[in-house]
Image (tube, helix red, strand yellow):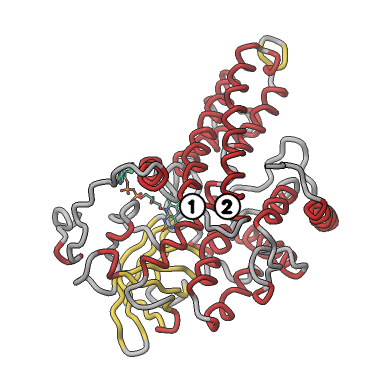
Amino acid sequence: MDFNDTPEEAAFRAEARSWLEANAEPLAPGESPRPSSERTTPEEVKAAQAWQKKKADAGWACITWPEQYGGRGATPMQNVIWNEEQSKFRMPADIFSIGIGMCGPTILAHGTEEQRQRWIPKLLSGEEIWCQLFSEPSAGSDLAGLRSTAVRDGDEWIVNGQKIWTTGAHFCDWGILVVRTDPTVAKHAGLSYFVVDMHSPGVEVRPITQINGGQGFNEVFFTDVRIPDDQRISEVGNGWAVAITTLMNERQSIGSGMGIGAVEDLVGLARDIEVDGAPALEDRQVRERIADFVVKARGLKYTSLRTLTALSQGRPPGPEASMGKLVGAVLQQEAASFAMELGGASGALLDEEAAVAGAAWQQRYLSIPGLRIAGGTDEVLRNIIAERVLGLPPDARADKGIPFKDIPSGPPNA
Ligand SMILES: Cc1cc2nc3c(=O)[nH]c(=O)nc-3n(C[C@H](O)[C@H](O)[C@H](O)COP(=O)(O)OP(=O)(O)OC[C@H]3O[C@@H](n4cnc5c(N)ncnc54)[C@H](O)[C@@H]3O)c2cc1C
């Protein structure tokens, strides 16, 4: 593979860069490109929407999406180039990753033309913000075991149940929702997929406070929430197939590039910070550790380019995309841990004044355990790689083929 831009790619890069230079602020050295979306204030939500609108008006939002919905029909490679260029500029909080990374592609793949026309343009322009209502207190890795229900009532469905870990639900307008519509068939067969208006009566959003002090996700309760049938995506009972499209896109959007930026930041930190009166990067032991990190980051980069090759040849992102998150999140955690070691006594402090780089590494260290769970835990990703990449025998599935209503649900109130 040739890693240099082709003349067409170089021209595209120049066009992207010149628009960004005219419309955004370049990053200062060592500055992180985006504020965390876990502490997003209403003003930051507005700023993120304004930036998204600006991009949409100029044809730089969701560039791989079809032109008829506001995209520019760009190739996956052009998207990588755009993201590379955009990462050099100061950006508002990333509140659209779920809508753009998962909800939009799912509606484009499975929605009717009317549904696409109804939701995609406002999703793309940032006017409406989306969340993903999949996980429940007893259904995360085993998503098909979910217990929230929808019962048909004429042209509407009545939804009851609870979702959890719903990122951004507190500022979202719409959510993609998977619920059980038939408990008499096997668990995967009884699910249906809907779009729910988060402002509907009966939707209650309660924030959850995380270990790092942020409130990025929520519990969401549904009490007799009415959803019109024209907000159902695909056929009744086909929810699992639609959810798989969302999850494949989730893995792709969460995993790619993870860890590589942390290692680059670590090299910068080792240049700035001193050990025994000299830059840490000149210390032999520090250099050795950093070299290990850089080798892993390069491995990740080239593995992600393999996924990209599949995409550029028109193949969907495959299960090997799971490797990016599995390896990248651990790498990021190890890099943050080493950065805190480099900080010496202040490494253990979460104080913006006392810790190096405004305690950004400490914040990162506390956020990464969530990354190792969201979008598939380490163990689940290992199972996917074992079964679908290496072809090893599948995990035991004791409830396979059993009607959902006959699967024991554990002790009362569990
Ligand atoms: C930061 C963050 C954001 C999130 N945002 C969203 C969101 O926006 N929308 C949403 O719907 N969900 C969201 N989630 C939820 C996420 O998808 C789930 O947490 C995840 O799927 C794991 O499910 P669980 O928490 O129920 O853990 P469980 O599935 O109960 O897992 C518990 C433990 O058992 C292990 N385990 C489970 N099954 C197996 C197996 N077959 N083999 C081996 N080990 C296994 C797991 O690896 C884990 O260690 C978010 C989570 C986080 C951390």
Q: Earlier in the sequence, mark 1 or mark 2?
A: 2
Q: Can you tell which mark lies on residue 217?
A: none
Secondary structure under the numbered disc 2 in the rendered image: helix
In the image, what residue type sits under mark 2?
Ala
Residue that badge 2 annotates: 310
**Which residue is depicted at the point 62% across and 32% down?**
263
The image quarter in which residue 28 lies: top right
In x, y percent, where is residue 84?
Answer: 71, 47
The kind of residue tagged 1 is: Gly
Residues tagged 1 and 2 counted as in contact (Cβ below 8 A): yes
Which residue lies at the image location 64% right of the left edge and 34% below the top edge? 358
In space, the residues marked 1 and 2 are separated at their CA atoms by: 8 Å
Q: How many residues crowd mark 2 within 10 Å: few (<14), some (14–19), many (20+)? A: some
Which quadrant, please, contains the N terminus?
top right
Q: Is mark 2 within 8 Å of ligand 1?
A: no
Mark 1 lies within 8 Å of ligand 1 (Cβ measured)? no
- The answer to whether residue 378 is above or below residue 82 is above
Q: Which residue is mark 1?
A: 318
SS category of the residue bearing label 1: loop
Q: Quadrant of the C terminus?
A: bottom left
In the displayed structure, does residue 71 sit left or right of residue 135? right
Residue 46: x %, y % from top left: 65, 63
Q: Position of residue 213 (x, y in %)?
A: 49, 44
